[in-house]
Image (cartoon, rainbow, N blue to C red):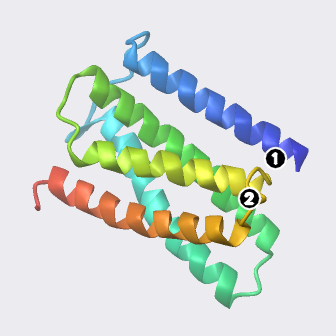
């Protein structure tokens, strides 16, 4: 558990470092790949991972005999990596002073979702654990809806 905690802290630190560096324009990671910029592709990958794996995680932990410890590790570290990708996109959007619109709501939900999951996983929320679990699940459902709306809006569908 200590190794997982350290690795999770390292991933969060890297996410913050890369996002702040991107926002401060310490490096330029924005280049065009097909119809989108690189930061958009990162958010598409991160957001898609979150949407797909949140559903897979919820189903798998309830209805299969898969090893739950392994499943939780994939859920946690995959979500942290997706958080890093989305953080780079959000920082890039902030650096270019775009109207953030639903992106701000999406990112704030993601931050609270990651924070609540992190604190539950590592025992930082020991009081009323069941209430925090319900909160975390509710955040995942909210995140799911807001990510879909944000994507549909930015692809010009809504």
Q: Quadrant of residue 107?
A: top left
Q: Residue furthest top?
A: 26
Looking at the rendered image, the quarter that the C terminus falls into is bottom left
Q: Position of residue 134 (x, y in %)?
A: 58, 72
**Left or right position of 82 against 149:** right
Q: Is residue 21 above or below residue 2?
A: above
**Does residue 31 appear anywhere in the picture?**
no
Q: Secondary structure at mark 2?
A: helix
- Callout 1 crowding tier (Cα within 10 Å): few <14, some 14–19, many ≥20: some
Q: Position of residue 113 (x, y in %)?
A: 53, 54
Q: Position of residue 59 (x, y in %)?
A: 58, 82
Give the residue displayed 43% in from the left and 70% down from the top.
141
Q: In this view of the protein, which residue sits in the foreground, 156 or 102?
A: 102
- 3D distance between C-alphas at marks 2 and 1: 8 Å
Give the residue displayed 63% in from the left and 64% down from the top.
132
Q: Residue furthest front?
A: 127
Q: Position of residue 22 (x, y in %)?
A: 42, 20
Are the residues flagged by discs 2 and 1 in contact, CB closer than 8 Å?
yes
Q: Residue furthest bottom?
A: 63
The dot on residue 4 is: 1
**Left or right position of 105 against 18:** left
Mark 2 sits on what residue?
73
């Amino acid at each position: 558990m200590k190794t997982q905690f350290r690795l999770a802290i390292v991933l969060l630190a890297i996410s913050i470092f890369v996002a702040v560096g991107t926002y401060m324009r310490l490096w330029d990671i924005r280049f065009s790949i097909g119809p989108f910029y690189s930061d958009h592709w990162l958010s598409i990958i991160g957001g898609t991972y979150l949407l797909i794996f949140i559903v897979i995680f919820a189903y798998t932990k309830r209805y299969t005999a898969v090893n739950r410890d392994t499943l939780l590790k994939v859920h946690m570290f995959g979500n942290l990596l997706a958080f890093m990708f989305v953080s780079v996109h959000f920082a890039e959007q902030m650096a270019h002073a775009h109207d953030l619109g639903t992106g701000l709501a999406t990112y704030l939900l993601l931050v609270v979702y990651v924070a609540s999951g992190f604190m539950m996983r590592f025992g930082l929320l020991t009081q009323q654990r069941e209430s925090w679990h319900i909160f975390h699940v509710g955040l995942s459902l909210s995140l799911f809806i807001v990510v879909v709306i944000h994507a549909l809006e930015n692809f010009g569908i809504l």
